[in-house]
Image (cartoon, rainbow, N blue to C red):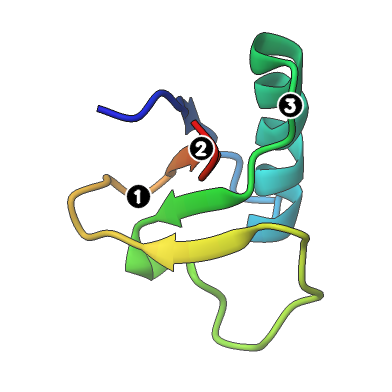
Amino acid sequence: MQPGLLWFDDDPELDLITKINRAIVVYQNQYGLKPDLCFVHPSMLPRKKQVAVEIEIRTDRQLKPDLLWLGNHAL
């Protein structure tokens, strides 16, 4: 299993990009490098395109809404 960070953020006032950016900070503090991959439940993707972040965002129906999984391809 690839190491990563499972992050829960159910703040309804924050958009997905903000939630991902908050999780990136925690990931960097924990692992000492920047994640380049984020999995989210498909329902979390916005209907309108948002400003892109420097991380690949993929969907996974196995994740519950409000959970984000961050990882790095190099690990």
First-in-chain label (1 vs 3) = 3
Q: Amino acid at mark 1?
A: Pro
First-in-chain label (1 vs 2) = 1
Residue at screen point 35% across, 68% down: 42
Residue at screen point 74% across, 16% down: 32
What is the x, y in percent for residue 39?
Answer: 42, 52
The image quarter containing residue 41 is bottom left
Q: Which mark is residue 47?
A: none
- Which one is in front, 42 or 70? 70
Could you tell me if the residues under marks 2 and 3 are in contact, i.e. CB atoms within 8 Å? no
Q: Amino acid at mark 2?
A: Gly
Residue at screen point 24% across, 27% down: 1
The 10 Å Cα crowd at callout 2, few under 14, some 14 to 19, many 20 or more, is many
Q: Nearer the viewer, mark 1 or mark 3?
A: 3
47 to 5, vertically: above or below: below
**Is label 2 in a helix, a strand or a loop?**
strand
First-in-chain label (2 vs 3) = 3
In the image as oriented, which residue stretches furthest toward the bottom?
Answer: 48
What is the x, y in percent for residue 45?
Answer: 50, 71
Q: How far is mark 2 from mark 3, CA to CA?
A: 10 Å
Q: Nearer the viewer, mark 1 or mark 2?
A: 2
57 to 7, vertically: above or below: below
According to the image, label 3 marks what residue?
Answer: 33
49 to 73, vertically: above or below: below
What is the x, y in percent for residue 67?
Answer: 41, 40
Q: Amino acid at mark 3?
A: Leu
According to the image, label 1 marks what residue?
Answer: 65
According to the image, label 2 marks what residue?
Answer: 71
The answer to whether 63 appears left or right of 30 in the picture is left
The answer to whether 43 appears left or right of 36 in the picture is left
29 to 37, vertically: above or below: above
The image quarter containing residue 64 is top left
